[in-house]
Amino acid sequence: MVKHIVMWKLKNKADSEIIKDKLNALVGKIPGLLRIEVGIDFSQNAAAFHMVLIAELESKAALEAYRIHPEHQAVIPLVQAAAVDRAVVDYEV
């Protein structure tokens, strides 16, 4: 299994709910994507990222398929327009 973790700082934290809904909607549409968890930060810490995505995928191949899948690609412009910073970690479990 592979975990794909992405964190974003947003221009406007209010955009987080829309992004969360779009990301959660990917479950069941992309082969090999087992689970998605999207969290919105509630802290007032200036160093905190506003959102986190934790995706669980069957394998490295499934992660690559997820990255190029049209459903995922459709969400990317929304997130890119809203984000000012991004951090990513991919690892095998």
Image: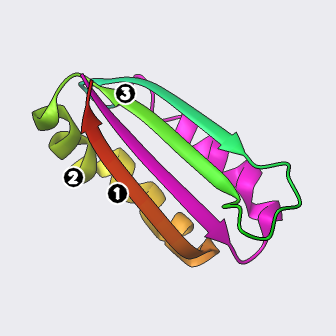
- What's under tag 3, amino acid-wise? Glu
Residue 53, relative to residue 35: is it above or below?
A: below
Residue 73, label in figure: 1
Mark before the other along the chain sequence, 1 or 2: 2
Disc 2 crowd, CA 10 A, few/some/many (<14, 14-19, 20+) = few
Label 1 and label 2: CA atoms lie apart by 6 Å
- Label 2 residue SS: helix
Q: Nearer the viewer, mark 3 or mark 1?
A: 3
Q: Pinpoint residue 45: horizontal percent, then vertical percent.
A: 82, 62
The C terminus lies in which quarter of the figure? top left
As for residue 91 lying within the magenta part, the answer is: no
Residue 65, relative to residue 82: is it above or below?
A: above
Image point (14%, 36%), residue name: 60
Q: In the rendered image, which residue does mark 2 sit on?
A: 68
Image point (39%, 57%), residue name: 88
Q: Which of marks 3 and 2 is in front?
A: 3
- Label 3 residue SS: strand
- What's under tag 2, amino acid-wise? Ile
Q: Pinpoint residue 17: horizontal percent, then vertical percent.
A: 75, 49
| Residue stretch in magenta | 1-29
As for residue 28 lying within the magenta part, the answer is: yes
Q: In the rendered image, which residue does mark 3 sit on?
A: 56
Image point (71%, 59%), residue name: 50
Mark before the other along the chain sequence, 3 or 2: 3
Horizontal side, residue 60 vs residue 22: left or right: left
Residue 57, relative to residue 66: is it above or below?
A: above
The N terminus lies in which quarter of the figure? top left
Horizontal side, residue 47 vs residue 38: left or right: right
Residue 4, label in figure: none
- Which sits in the foreground, 62 or 85? 85
